[in-house]
Image (spheres, grey):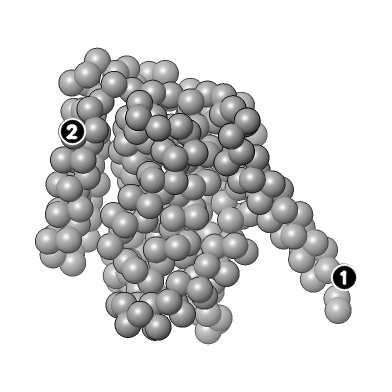
Amino acid sequence: MHPIFIITYAAFAAMVTLLFSFLVRVVRKDTALPGGRIIPVPIVEVALVLVLVAASLYFSPPKLAWAFAINALIIGLGWLLMSRHGVLLKPLLGIPWNPLRTLATAFWISLALCPLAGFLVVINQYLCKTLELPSEGQSLHDILLHSNDFPLLAKVIVLSIIIAPAAEEFLVRAVVQSALRQYMNASAAIILTSILFSALHLTPSVFLPLMFNGIVFGIAFERKGSLPFNILIHSCSNVLFIIVTFAERFYGQPGTLPGLG
């Protein structure tokens, strides 16, 4: 085997080991999660917002313009909940380190997710086949894989790496996860939020990998309390997915990453 492959596999193994140890520590009862943030938003209001968002996603026509509109709706609803209860957004806008280190850390985390997320994709596809659940990919993935319309591709990329990560992290992590912390400990809030995060995508074929990604995103937010940092991790994950999709398109290699989150 060529040395470069040995180095690559060793690096991935090290990243997976570190990520796994991080997840093990976080679910231990005696492990505190510094930086946790609790906001006083009633759970009933959070549930109503999630139902409205889910209904908007489910009943919206498969058009890109609607995807932009729904993300704007998500940001607006999150902002409404926070402003209604006097929650300030400014404390969430800081970054944990200098910009370069923050970006590098976000990219490292998203890269470390790849092997386990790819493994979960295989399990998820097997379960979908066994349980006869719909396993078709997301429409955005289909556009990236087959469309030759450059303006359309550009809009999908902007939606995937800027708008959707910002909207989802704002609502799911800054609002929902922080509100759930009123009623449960950090680990339970992270897991429940990650399940909701995955379910809102309405795509059974990538439920498990998206839930796993959601857990890691939730841990990052609980530890650092930084919305920009979470958006960067989410964006980098989607960038890697786009790269793999284009590799599949131009070189015929099958993708191994979960769908766009």
Place residue 171 in its image quadrant: top left
The residue lying at 57 percent from left, 24 percent from top is 34
Q: Is residue 62 above or below residue 181?
A: below
For this rendering, which residue is in front, 25 or 162? 25
Examine the rendering and report whether any part of residue 202 can be seen: yes
Determine the CA span between mark 1 and mark 2. Answer: 55 Å
Q: Secondary structure at mark 1?
A: helix
Residue position for label 2:
45
Residue plotted at (16% across, 40% down): 48
Q: For mark 1, what is the residue?
A: 3
Residue at 31% from the left image edge and 57% from the top image edge: 199
Q: Residue 202's x, y, as percent?
A: 28, 62
State the quadrant of the C terminus.
bottom left
Q: Tell me residue 170's x, y (percent).
A: 34, 36
* Other residues around mark 1 within 10 Å, as few (<14) / some (14–19) / many (≥20): few
Residue type, label 2: Glu
Circle 2: is it few (<14), some (14-19), or many (20+) Cα within 10 Å? few
Secondary structure beneath label 2: helix
Amino acid type shown at disc 1: Pro
Sequence order check: which comes first, mark 1 or mark 2? 1
Q: Is residue 5 left or right of residue 110?
A: right
Marking on residue 114: none
- Toward the front, the furthest residue is 29
Where the N terminus falls, by quadrant?
bottom right
